Amino acid sequence: MPRIITKQDDFIIDQPLDLKVIDCTPSDIIHVSAEMYDEENKLFHSYASFFTKDSGVVDLALDIPFEGTYDRADAAGLIWSMILKDTGEDDYFVKKTDCDLSLEFYVKHKGEIVDSKNISIKFMASNVRMLDITQSGITGSLYGPVGEGKYPAVIILSGSDGGNEAHASSYLASKGYLVLSLSYFNDTGLKSNLEYIELEYFKDATVFLKYHEQCNGKINLIGYSKGAELVLLLGEKYDGYTSIIAGAPSSHITSGMKNGMFTPVTGWVHEGEPLPFLKMRFSVGMVLKSMKGWIMKQPFKFLDVWEKSMDAEAAIESRIEVRNISCPLLVIAGGSDQLWPSKFHAESIQDRRLDSRDEYLIYEEGGHFISFPYSFNQLPANVNMKVGKMTMNFGGSKKINAEASKQSLEKILNFLIVHNK
């Protein structure tokens, strides 16, 4: 009878999954599927069918499915290719906390489930602990190595969903960093929306972390999407950061957000003054195109709004002066980003910087969600998101975005090592 074997019953998110189905009848057909809930209790699933070899073993790392939700030999294929089980559609997989994920595998033969296996995906390793920040005046989650000593520190900033990326922070702490996942809206005691956020809040958080008993004085910033815009802005306004990593960035200050939608107010305030932001310009053609997409139930793309807005002369005053950032940058962008033109922004940053320490990763076919802290290749890859009765497309494909997240994570970890020696 076919059965599942793995090397371990749990694994840290960046450890390769080793899963095989053994005791199969040669020249037979085996169906393997997987299920996992996200943190909004949405059930995702995936499946793949294989012709069994003479060895009677199906190895997910080596064997190519002849049908399924993915189409290549990939041990993580059943994870990154997951879609909603109830509708068969794609949606955003929500993961924010440091809690384990429960991943269930099933093997089906001749229409019947013959074996199953539960595996836990972990983010917080045994060599990491959560540290107290209740007296600091800031909101978020702080993680550090269990052992005594001083470590380089990292602040991770969320994008337009707010809250904080505790799962990513606890993971990064296992690599030898003191990591603060800092909330700045949509969390207890903070504003509900990304509007009029004072930059001094982040300055205070930086000072708190720099003088923490486990910090060696080096502070790095990581931000994604609106968070990438923010870390570049912080690097412009404040000196003393060791490095900055910006994923799917904007080279301009974009508008604030309310209820998850862009709104015509500033997101940032510096020294009591609201900062100028890029005004969105909606063409009649785009509005009609959006209405048609809604009627036809086609995914909505926001990219055209920004391309139209970037043509305006008024965009100049909202540009982030990246030449004033003194530390090295790692900038990551997808050429098929459908939320905003992150490749254009990345290239604009590079053209104005001309700093040999910087690194730029452009994934031409990648979408908006292609790197840490928002993407791991062993989580369902994000392309579409349900927004009410509409579907918003962020670009790329599950396969390409998953591959980009795998490659870029290695680059991110190496970048931090190089600049924190």
Image (spheres, rainbow, N blue to C red):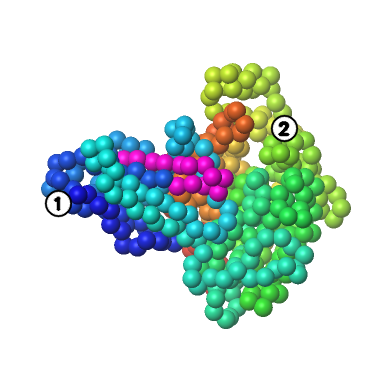
In the picture provided, is 379 more to the left or to the right than 66? right
45 in magenta:
yes
Residue matched to label 1: 55
* Direction bottom: furthest residue: 148
Q: Residue at x 31, y 40 (%)?
A: 48
The mark that comes first in sequence, 2 or 1, is: 1
Check disc 1: other Cα within 10 Å, few if <14, some if 14-19, many if 20+: few
| x and y, in percent, of residue 166 in the image | 59, 59
Residue 291 screen position, x and y as percent: 62, 20
Amino acid type at circle 1 is Ser
- What residue range appears in magenta? 36-48
Q: Nearer the viewer, residue 325 or 7?
A: 7
What kind of element bears circle 2?
loop
Q: Amino acid at mark 2?
A: Met
The quadrant where residue 306 appears: top right
In front of the other: 94 or 202: 94
| Residue receiving disc 2 | 280
Asked where in the image residue 256 lies, by quadrant, the reply is top right
Q: How many marks?
A: 2
Quadrant showing the C terminus:
bottom right
Dot 2 surroundings within 10 Å: few (below 14), some, or many (20 or more)?
some
User: For the residue labelled by badge 1, is the local secondary structure a helix, a strand or a loop?
Assistant: loop
Is residue 84 visible in the rendered image? The answer is yes
Query: What's the residue at 35%, 63% (across, down)?
Result: 8
Residue at 21% x, 53% y: name it.
Answer: 22
Q: CA distance from mark 2 to mark 1?
A: 60 Å
